[in-house]
Image (spheres, grey):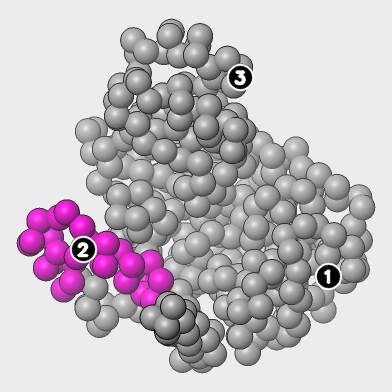
Amino acid sequence: MNQAVIPGGEHTALAVVRSLGKKNIESTVISENPQALAFSSKYCTRRLISDATTDVFSGFTKDDIVMPVLEDQMVELAKHRSSFQCAMAFPEYSVLEMASNKKTVLERAHELNIPCPETFFFKDPDNCCAEFEDLKSSLQFPAVIKPYRGHGGEGVSFIDSADLVIDRCKETVRKCGPVMVQEKIPYNERYSVAVIMNFDQEIRLSCVLKELRYFPVDSGPSTCVESIYRPDLVACAQDILESMDFYGIAELDFINDSRNNTPLLMEINPRFWGSLQGAISAGVDFPHQLYRLFTEGTIDKKDTYKRGVRTRNVIFNDYRRLCSIVKGNYQKNYKISSCIEFLQFYRDDAYFIFDLDDMKPFLSLVNDIMSRKMRKNVN
């Protein structure tokens, strides 16, 4: 049986380790953090402390398969695939680069008539001043500046007036590379659409998660998700991924435009994503099925999963969200309702980290938090 190689070590990697370990599949977790959550899991077979470079993968063989967790690392591995013996559970470089580039994704969505936000791309990142003069008359504020490539909100900034655009663009280009300016959509709902495509570009598994809460409050990663049924969004995923000759795991982000109730495609993540445990809890075991796809060549098609399953990231982001609301400039009623909402544990079906079957990661996290607070108080 092939061994899974899982980079990252944090809660997304933990979900992958648990999924595979419960199917008796051995795994090596790689992280530069000696206290990585996944290291503590009883399902973690081997721990490897290493930085984020690809050099460490030279030590693996054809019997090892790298799982898609860290996007930048995946792109580098795919780009130099012939230099490594290990198998990789993600597409070749050309496909991966296309799916992870927001500019390419939005242009392809436009070609396929898939709704997405109005976006302006600078043709020459080093000369955005001249191009912006043509943009001024049509751009509406507030707007968002985003790098073509990036994840977790990296390089994203919000601007309220034209005066800030040039300086922010130059700063983002310097840190993250080419950028785009996008209208800031007023939305009332966010969706995470996850799929596995087979090698014939057909969706074999899917799961849609509605993001109920997020941190930071207005724009951050999800802290609480619930499985729902949205075949229209899955159909959009099929269309755009098929057009890219994609195969493997992908997660697509949609927001619902509150002005006209239209779901808009925001980006594609060609990897496992932060709320992966929400899909697993709903009965769609993406890590194990992806492992099977790349080791056996095919998996069965399944459209059904449990709906209404709630999964929460309590200790990290949901608690931090609550603190930011209580301490922030919000209405008193909103603060009270947020407190009540946070304390409704009876509505939770599962958690990103806490698991009675595998308690060490949770206990390790609590210990780490307490230790840091004690050190902070001493200092």
For residue 96, the mark is: none
Q: In the picture provided, is 222 more to the left or to the right than 177? A: left
State which tag comes first along the sequence, 3 or 1.
1
Crowd tier of the residue under label 1, counting other residues whose Cα lies within 10 Å: few below 14, some 14–19, many 20 or above: many
State which tag comes first along the sequence, 2 or 1.
1
Mark 3, secondary structure of its residue: helix
Q: CA distance from mark 2 to mark 1?
A: 48 Å
Q: CA distance from mark 3 to mark 2?
A: 40 Å
User: Which residue is at the far left?
Assistant: 333
Crowd tier of the residue under label 3, counting other residues whose Cα lies within 10 Å: few below 14, some 14–19, many 20 or above: few
For residue 126, the mark is: 3
**Picture quarter with the C terminus:** bottom left
Q: Does 60 sit above or below residue 45?
A: above
Q: Is residue 16 visible?
A: no
Q: Based on the displayed image, in which of its 4 quarters is residue 263 positioned?
A: top left
Q: Based on the displayed image, in which of its 4 quarters is residue 56 positioned?
A: bottom right
Q: For the point 11% across and 68% down, which residue is it?
A: 336
Magenta-drawn segment: 312-340
User: What amino acid is labelled 1 in the image?
Assistant: Asp
For residue 327, the mark is: 2
Q: Position of residue 367 (x, y in %)?
A: 48, 87
State which tag comes first along the sequence, 3 or 2.
3
Q: Is residue 339 magenta?
A: yes
Mark 2, secondary structure of its residue: helix
Q: Position of residue 66 (x, y in %)?
A: 76, 64
Q: Does 176 sit above or below residue 344?
A: above
User: What amino acid is labelled 3 in the image?
Assistant: Asp
Q: Is residue 75 visible?
A: yes
Mark 1, secondary structure of its residue: strand
Q: Nearer the viewer, residue 197 or 287?
A: 287
| Residue under numbered circle 1 | 64
Q: Nearer the viewer, residue 300 or 346?
A: 346
